[in-house]
Amino acid sequence: MFSKNPFEAAAKTMKDSAEKFNPAAAQEAFKPVMDHLKAWGDLAQKQAQAAQASMAETVESFKNVKEPQAAFEAMKASAENSIAIAKKNLKDVTALGVAQFNSSVDALEKAHPAPEVFANVGKSLKTAASSMETALESAMKNGVTAVKKARNS
């Protein structure tokens, strides 16, 4: 038991492991994490730009409104556009999440001491993720259909 301070064990472990540390290997191992973060950042930027363009379009459409019916139509068009953007964003986020999940399962299988044993588990995990993605797409489609029905009633 270490008695000097609570960080003594961590410091000893770090000191003992320092000569085994390979910066190049650590950087290579961390590359998929950085790639995933970049993909999320790119997606967020793309979605923010689409939302900004949609907002600018809505503002422009309201500039020419002279009567209440035109305002109602502009609001309706804006709502439809917002639903379409939300649907696309959710679909893109889901697709990215499932793709990254699948690549993580592949990496886990590759690193597993007995990859052939893990293969069936990995396949089941990927199937479950795919089923979730399909269910979400179906729910979004049903939601958009319900909104369109409500709008037309």
Image (cartoon, grey):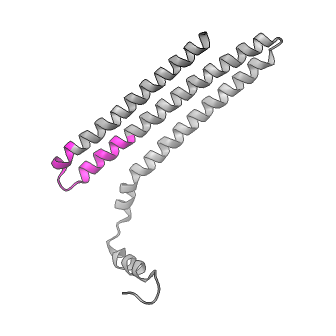
Determine whether 73 is above or below 44 in the image.
above
Instruction: Write down the region rendered in magenta.
Output: 100-120
Residue located at (24% from left, 48% from top):
109
Residue 68 locus on image (x, y percent): 80, 13
Which quarter of the image is occupied by the C terminus? top right
In percent of width and height, residue 63 lies at 80, 19
Residue 23, image x and y in percent? 38, 64
- Quarter of the image for the N terminus: give it: bottom left
Magenta: main secondary structure equals helix
Q: Residue furthest right?
A: 66
Please count the marks in the image. Answer: 0
- Does residue 6 appear to the left or right of 117 in the view shown? right
Residue 117 on the magenta segment: yes
Q: Any magenta on residue 67?
A: no
Q: Quadrant of residue 125?
A: top left
Please determine whether, in this image, residue 140 is positioned above or below residue 64: below
